[in-house]
Image: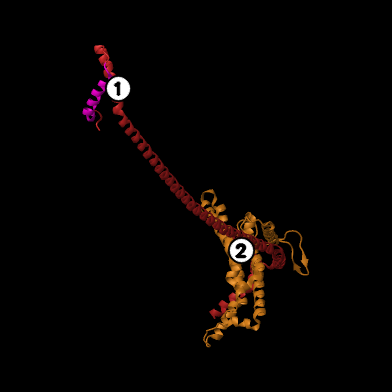
Chain colours: A red, B orange
Amino acid sequence: MIKKYFFHSIFLNLFFLKEVFAAESGGMPQLNPEFWVSQIFWLTLTFGILYIVLSKAILPKISSNLELRKSQIQENIEAAEKQRIESDTKLKEYDDLILKSKVKAKNIYKDAREKVIKDINLKKEVLDHQIDEEIKKAEKEIEVLKKNAPEKINKIAIETSSELIKKLIGAEINSSSISAIVDDLSKRNGDKYYGN
Amino acid sequence: MAANPMTQFEVYRIGPEVKIGSFDISFTNASLFMVISSLAILIIFNLGSKKNSVLPNKIQLLAELSYIFVSKMISETAGSKAKPYFAFIFSLFMFVLFCNMFGMIPYTFTVTSHIIVTFVLAAFIFIGVTIVGFIKHGFGYLKLFVPSGVPNVLLPLIVVIEIISYLSRPISLSVRLFANMMAGHTMMKVFGGFVVSLGIIGGWLPLSFSVALTGLEILVAFLQAYVFAILTCIYLNDALNLHH
């Protein structure tokens, strides 16, 4: 019995719900069906227009904008990649060039060094030769001078001694006798004077 | 007037009474906010799609981000087969979102706080999804109610439960949105009323609650629009890719 009343009351409540809320000023305005048709009509109208304009005009545009941007960015990335590869090869070429030129410069330096050393050696030899010749010449001259020196000295000795005697005793003495004496002296002391 | 928190949901006629046959289709404040929301969406997305610069400006970025957001949501829940329904779900999401958000401005009317509006949307989705399912799979769509791997003894019960859950989709979908919107706005109105009645000394606490609730309600406004759209996607997924 209690159960039956319970369900009965709930059913009645549901049945009279609209009327209860409509009658009460403080009820839920949502359950007042006065403007339901109006709301359905305007919802269909506005949402329909919104859907048609969005789907026909605006969304395809946004989609194509996005696609365009994507492809543009992709192209740019590809171009950048290409340029990067290009610059890499160029850099390699440049490195190769520098390496080659370094080797070349080293070779040139080596060659020049060898050449200069050769030149120096050649010139040194020539100079050594010349110096040797000069030394030989000088030695020959010295030899000649050495050979001639005793005679000259003897001559000077004879002249000076005859002068000395003239001044000392005022007499002219035969130069031949003087020369005999000088020769005799020089022969005895020759070794002492010239060290030969 | 301010005493009753339900007065904000009242619909009233703006302008003259218009009747087609016995139906009253007068322009009301609800109609006004439907028009405002639709116009706002159209204006924003039209501006956002007008120019295509590689570096988008703010409005273009907004339009494109929402486009990507919705398209991602659809492809994640309903797969690539749902692409033809993108425009519908996009407009649905935007319409509900803008109606919810316009309702957050004081002294405005929240279109989605009316059960009839949300129910019409949900019913349309339900009928549309059912039609799509029958077109795609013929009577094989009825396999949706027969889950695989269920013992034969339980099968009649399961089928009945599945059918009830399928039929209750439009109700749950519409009531979820409507109840969330109505409850939030009512609560804000109640707290607002407390601010007035408690005066300058005691009113600060409900005022701070009101401020916090506004933030929460903006979150709920977005979340409910998102839930509405994503549930549509899930229903669509059931119709397009029959899993059972």
Kind of residue sitting beneath label 1: Ile
**Quadrant location of residue B51?**
bottom right
Please state, as top left, top right, bottom left or bottom right, where the C terminus of chain B lies in the image. Answer: bottom right
Residue B43 percent coordinates (x, y): 69, 57
| Residue A184 in sight in this render | yes
Q: Is residue A68 left or right of residue A114?
A: right
Q: Nearer the viewer, residue A176 or A157?
A: A176
Q: Residues within 10 Å of mark 2 (few under 14, many from 20)?
A: some
Q: State which chain disc 2 sits on.
A: B
Q: Residue under circle 2?
A: B68
Farthest-out residue, top: A170
Q: Is residue B72 left or right of residue A180?
A: right
Q: Residue B149: say if magenta.
A: no
Q: Residue A177: say if magenta.
A: yes
- Give the structural element (helix, strand or loop) at label 2: helix
Residue B174 percent coordinates (x, y): 62, 69
Image disc number at residue A156: 1
Q: Is residue B185 left or right of residue A134?
A: right
